[in-house]
């Protein structure tokens, strides 16, 4: 009978891979043109990239070449994922003793011969304090390899199910359809007494100061003319179902109404005329989709640059060109949508800290706008 053994290098790689995937939520990524390397990514971590290099490096010149390649790949991933800063750990498993690892402000290179070398590393201990404990709990040899392989497979399966749930198609965007129907019905009613609707329900700073705060909500469902209605309802029909699908119906409705209110406050502070329309709320939905795209940018490759960002910029530019369009409501809705999305959290990507910080920032913004309105 042939005896199956596990090489030391294979065991080291498996223990490192197992820790970062199962304990720190890194995921393997495909990097074209590399061999005998494993790249791991977690854009929510301060250390966004982990590279495990199994290739033999025999001199300092080869190491410098390897570092240049490493830096080029890091910069490419940083650009594609819109990260302002991308730190990386470069783990070298097969380096000649005389060769000294090279590190810079963004890449920490670590030469190891055994897992214990990583346990002693200051950077590892600083950013991953549970590394030593978790790795020590893993069995050595073939039994340990099978156990870690099973756990890696289970983790991958679980994450795939979570991702599939987030991107599961929604058959009926009930909230979006309901909002469109309400806007159309209000517009039909306004045909019979448009001036009365404006005077009693449109947004206006002076009337808000007199206590008529309900105008922040009612003004969202009033439109100046049929073209204004059609343009906004088309935008709502395009972006609404996506936000409703990704965030869920309750969060979607909160984002929509709150963005509209914050947009209305911006408009009331910076404008003196009456304001109507769903634009602020719709810009909040665009912002929430932008926030979702940033959180899932590794999955939604190219959607930000090719879809969301250009649409936002074009609409803001149109608002800046035409004086009849309430640009301040658009900007306020955009800011409100980002804050509300941060507060309510994207599925599987948020934390209690995000919820608390987002709530505080939102309340500060509303408080500041209220103060500026009252002292205007």
Image (spheres, rainbow, N blue to C red):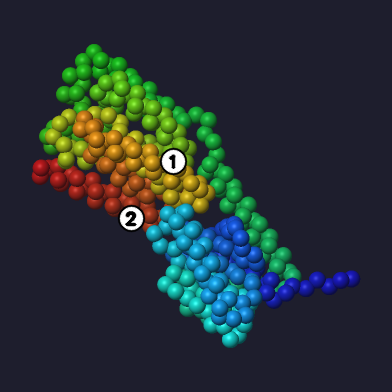
Quadrant for residue 134, please give it.
Answer: bottom right
Instruction: Identify the residue shown where x is 40% and y is 55%.
Output: 352
Crowding near pointer 2: few (<14 within 10 Å), some, many (20+)? few
Instruction: Identify the residue shown where x is 38% and y is 31%.
Output: 235
Mark 2: secondary structure? helix
Mark 1: secondary structure? helix
Tell me the number on the disc at residue 307. Answer: 1
The disc, 2 or 1, on the residue closer to the chain's N-terminal end is: 1
Q: Nearer the viewer, residue 344 or 226?
A: 226
Is residue 44 at all visible to an observer of this figure?
A: no
| Horizontal and vertical percent position of residue 79 | 45, 56
Q: Nearer the viewer, residue 4 or 226?
A: 226
* Residue named by callout 2: 357
Total numbered circles: 2
Alpha carbon of mark 2 to alpha carbon of mark 1: how far? 29 Å
Seen in the picture, residue 320 relative to 135 is either above or below; the reply is above
Is residue 328 at all visible to an observer of this figure?
A: yes
Crowding near pointer 1: few (<14 within 10 Å), some, many (20+)? few
| Horizontal and vertical percent position of residue 59 | 59, 81
**Which residue is situated farthest in the left direction here?**
375
Instruction: Identify the residue shown where x is 45% and y is 43%.
Output: 306
Quadrant for residue 211, please give it.
Answer: top left
């Amino acid at each position: 009978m042939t005896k199956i053994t596990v090489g030391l290098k294979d065991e080291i790689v498996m223990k490192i891979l197992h820790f970062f995937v199962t304990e720190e939520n890194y995921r393997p990524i495909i990097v074209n043109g590399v061999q005998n390397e494993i790249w791991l990514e977690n854009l929510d971590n301060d250390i966004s990239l982990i590279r495990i290099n199994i290739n033999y490096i025999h001199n300092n010149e080869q190491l410098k070449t390897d570092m240049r390649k490493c830096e080029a790949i890091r910069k490419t991933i940083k650009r594609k994922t819109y990260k302002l800063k991308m730190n990386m750990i470069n783990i070298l498993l097969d380096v000649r003793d005389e060769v000294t690892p090279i590190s810079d402000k963004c890449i920490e290179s670590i030469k190891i011969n055994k897992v214990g070398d990583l346990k002693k590393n200051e950077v590892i201990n600083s950013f991953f304090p549970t590394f030593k404990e978790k790795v020590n709990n893993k069995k050595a040899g073939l039994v340990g390899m099978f156990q870690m392989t099973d756990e890696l497979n289970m983790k991958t399966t679980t994450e795939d199910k979570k991702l599939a749930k987030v991107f599961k198609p929604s058959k009926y965007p009930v909230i979006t359809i309901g909002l469109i129907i309400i806007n159309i019905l209000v517009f039909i009613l306004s045909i019979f007494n448009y001036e009365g609707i404006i005077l009693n329900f449109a947004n206006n700073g002076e009337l808000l100061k007199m206590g008529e705060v309900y105008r922040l909500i009612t003004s969202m469902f009033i439109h100046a003319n049929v073209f204004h209605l059609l343009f906004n309802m088309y935008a709502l029909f395009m972006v609404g179902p996506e936000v409703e699908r990704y965030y869920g119906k309750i969060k979607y409705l909160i984002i929509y109404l709150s963005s509209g209110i914050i947009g209305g406050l911006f408009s009331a502070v910076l404008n003196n005329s009456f304001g109507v329309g769903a634009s602020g709320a719709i810009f909040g939905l665009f912002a929430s989709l932008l926030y979702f795209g940033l959180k899932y940018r590794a999955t939604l490759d190219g959607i930000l640059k090719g879809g969301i960002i250009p649409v936002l910029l074009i609409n803001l530019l149109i608002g800046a060109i035409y004086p009849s369009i309430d640009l301040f409501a658009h900007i306020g809705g955009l800011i409100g949508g980002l804050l509300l999305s941060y507060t309510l959290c994207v599925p599987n990507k948020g934390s209690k800290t995000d919820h608390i910080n987002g709530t505080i920032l939102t309340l500060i913004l509303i408080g500041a706008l209220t103060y500026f309105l009252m002292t205007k």
